[in-house]
Image: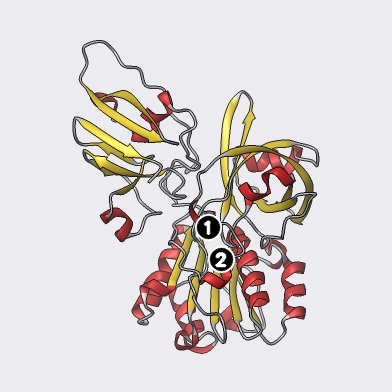
């Protein structure tokens, strides 16, 4: 799903929430769907009721995501979705959380959700994960910009509401691109937010297949159009923090242009909902160990318990794939190197990562890897999910 940065939030903003919110152990609990609301012709908002006894497990920061797990046609399906509303204080009756699901062409889960999902359904929901959250230590007088495409608006909704509510002087500018006005998710919610914060929220809708009054907002958001917008509507010199969310091509374009405009890398946070390559949501593949074949010894520590598994060298399987044979509860969501849920630290041995869209360079230097993308390069590998 995503590429994240670790949050560096101020003590004042985090004290009301659990200290482990940003990086807590990923666990599934069964929650009941409390509401399904249409957003567009192919997108819905799904809300879940969180009972009081699980409220602490679902405490989260705006910008985080949850993974949903269901069994369709006898197969396990996992999908990750950003939480679209800021956290609400839990009461004795529990609380709720909401995600937006947009139908993907050929998408198994999204198609099922659009056609079959109704209130009362029970779905396994993972505890909130991710660090696509604000790192501003001080909000007073800050200007935050979000650039989103399609369903990339989802975490922006929670972030914008939270930041605008947290300070009377914070400004939020949203550059949101879609094909047409009918594709704009949360259109009414954005209008309501604009009415509530008319001077501090600025909305720029870019439509690739509809003509808008302003020519710069009509057409695909390519490099030329983006540079024009950043040279006239949104001046980088006035921005304290940037949030980018959408497909790889858009996020990559924005990062390159912002870097070229001398925007410090540490002020740009981004999240991917697809890499544009192979399907990001894959389950574990079956691997068998045959007598006499060369193997790699993998030692996995999870929840304080150590387990050992042998992995055939010729199978070229990932650490996660092998771990799931002895620890079915090993955390993962996308299996595509995007979300970061399967993050662990290599204590001994060595691995190579095929893809990495979730870890920062400093995390890699400290030995952290994405186990779904990590393949052993030594005879013995020791990884710890608990560090």
- Relative side of 317 to 245, left or right: left
Work out whether residue 40 can be spotted. no
Between 186 and 130, the residue placed more toward the observer is 130
| Residue drawn at point x = 64 percent, y = 43 percent | 110
Query: Percent from the top left, x then y, of residue 231?
Result: 47, 87
Q: Residues within 10 Å of mark 1 (few under 14, many from 20)?
A: few
Relative to 29, residue 127 above or below: below
Q: Quadrant of residue 68?
A: top right
Position of 286 with respect to 18 (left or right) is: left
For the residues labelled 2 and 1, say whether their Cβ atoms are less than 8 Å apart: yes
Whole-percent x, y for residue 387 in the image: 37, 46
- Element carrying mark 2: helix
Q: Is residue 161 left or right of residue 258?
A: right
| Quadrant of res 53 | top right
Front one among 287 and 111 = 287
Q: Residue at x 45, y 68 (%)?
A: 8
Mark 2 vs mark 1: which is more N-terminal?
2
The residue nearer to you, when weighing 12 against 269, is 12
Q: State the mark number for residue 14.
A: 2
Q: Is residue 308 above or below residue 80?
A: above
Callout 1 secondary element: loop
Residue with the mark numbered 1: 19
Residue depicted at 60% across the width and 82% down the height: 170
């Amino acid at each position: 799903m995503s590429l994240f940065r670790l949050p560096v939030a101020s003590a004042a903003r985090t004290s009301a929430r659990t200290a482990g919110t940003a990086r807590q152990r990923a666990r599934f609990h069964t929650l009941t769907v409390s509401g399904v609301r249409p957003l567009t012709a192919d997108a819905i908002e799904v809300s879940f009721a969180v009972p009081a006894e699980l409220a602490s497990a679902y405490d989260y920061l705006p910008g985080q995501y949850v993974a949903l797990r269901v069994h369709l046609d006898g197969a396990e399906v996992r999908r990750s979705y950003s939480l679209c509303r800021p956290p609400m204080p839990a009461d004795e009756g529990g609380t709720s959380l909401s995600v937006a699901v947009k139908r993907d062409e050929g998408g198994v889960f999204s198609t099922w959700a659009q056609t079959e999902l109704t209130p009362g359904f029970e779905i396994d929901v993972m505890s909130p994960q991710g660090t696509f959250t604000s790192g501003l230590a001080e909000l007073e007088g800050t200007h935050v910009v979000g650039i989103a495409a399609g369903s990339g608006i989802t975490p922006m909704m929670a972030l914008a509401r939270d930041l605008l509510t947290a300070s009377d002087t914070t400004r939020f500018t949203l550059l949101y691109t879609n094909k047409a006005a009918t594709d704009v998710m949360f259109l009414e919610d954005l209008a309501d937010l604009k009415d509530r914060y008319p001077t501090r929220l600025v909305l720029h809708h870019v439509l690739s297949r509809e003509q808008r009054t302003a020519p710069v907002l009509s057409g695909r958001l390519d490099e030329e159009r983006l540079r024009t917008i950043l040279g006239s509507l949104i001046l980088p010199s006035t921005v304290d923090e940037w949030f980018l969310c959408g497909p790889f091509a858009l996020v990559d374009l924005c990062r390159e242009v912002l870097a070229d405009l001398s925007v410090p890398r540490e002020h740009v946070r981004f999240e991917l909902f697809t890499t544009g390559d192979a399907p990001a949501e894959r389950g574990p593949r079956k691997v068998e160990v045959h007598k006499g074949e060369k193997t790699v010894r993998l030692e996995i520590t999870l929840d304080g318990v150590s387990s050992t598994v042998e992995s055939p060298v010729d199978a070229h399987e990932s650490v996660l794939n092998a771990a799931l044979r002895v620890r079915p509860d090993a955390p993962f969501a996308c299996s595509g190197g995007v979300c970061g849920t399967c993050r662990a630290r290599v204590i001994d041995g060595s691995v190579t990562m095929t893809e990495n869209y979730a870890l920062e360079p400093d995390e890699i230097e400290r030995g952290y890897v994405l186990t779904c993308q990590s393949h052993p390069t030594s005879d013995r590998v020791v990884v710890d999910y608990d560090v």
